[in-house]
Image (cartoon, grey):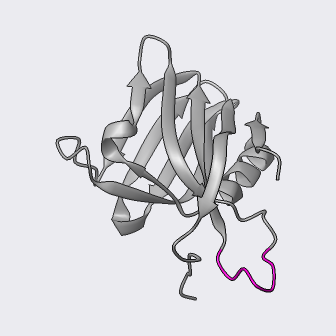
Amino acid sequence: MQPLRLVALDEQDLQIVSAHVQDAVTRVGEIHFSAADKQLAIPINRYAWEKKRRFFSRRGERRRSVLHFNRVLAMRSVGIDRTSPDTVLSLLAIDFAATDAPAGEIVLIFAGGAAISLNVEVIEVQLGDLGGAWEAAARPRHGV
């Protein structure tokens, strides 16, 4: 399977990126925001939802990836303790709400009520796989 490379420049693109990073995990200490560069970078271990499961392979795979946000004016977080860098966060979705189009707020929603809110000039998001893949310990499940 080829490494995934996606770019989001509008709300529809961002929904596609959100679907590909659903159930990705990261550690608090890996989240890097540079106010001077207006960038947020989050290395993630994403579940490869796009990979077709085979009959004898009931488990999926995870891939090391980076989720990168450009043109970020400000970042706020809720429910994330920056003094606990080893805490694992599980990303559920990425949402967008326009405030003064094309500017708006991108919200990364994590399990357990944690969230990161980004005030952005425009949507400019990249998702890229970095290397190999490994078998996931389990397939993520969501209650209905």
Residue 87 coordinates in the image, percent (x, y): 27, 54
Q: Is residue 125 left or right of residue 143?
A: right
Q: Quadrant of residue 113?
A: bottom left
Q: x%, y% of residue 8? A: 75, 38
Q: Residue furthest left?
A: 83
Which quadrant would the C terminus be assigned to in this image? bottom right
Task: Tell me if residue 57 comes above or below residue 102 in the rendering.
Answer: below
For residue 104, above or below residue 121: below
Q: Is residue 85 left or right of residue 91?
A: left
Report the residue at 41% width, 27% height from top.
33
**Camera-nearest residue between 136 and 79:** 136
Magenta span main SS: loop
User: Residue placed farthest to the top in the image?
Assistant: 36
Instruction: Say whether residue 107 is left or right of residue 126.
Output: left
- Whether 56 is among the magenta residues is yes
Quadrant assignment, res 130 = top right
Residue name at image x 26 percent, y 49 percent: 86
Q: Nearer the viewer, residue 31 or 105?
A: 31
* Front residue of 79 and 90: 90
Residue 123 showing in the rendered view:
no
**Left or right of 62, for residue 75:** left
Residue 51: image location, x then y, percent: 78, 65
Q: In the rendered view, tell whether residue 10 sits above or below residue 84.
A: above
Q: Is residue 141 magenta?
A: no
- Which residue, as the protein is rendered here, is positioned at the far front? 56
Give the residues drawn in magenta, as a range. Answer: 53-59
Q: Position of residue 7 (x, y in %)?
A: 76, 35
Which is nearer the eye, 19 or 12?
Answer: 19
Q: At 60% across and 43% down in the image, what residue appears? A: 65
Q: Examine the rendering and report whether any part of residue 1 can be seen.
A: yes
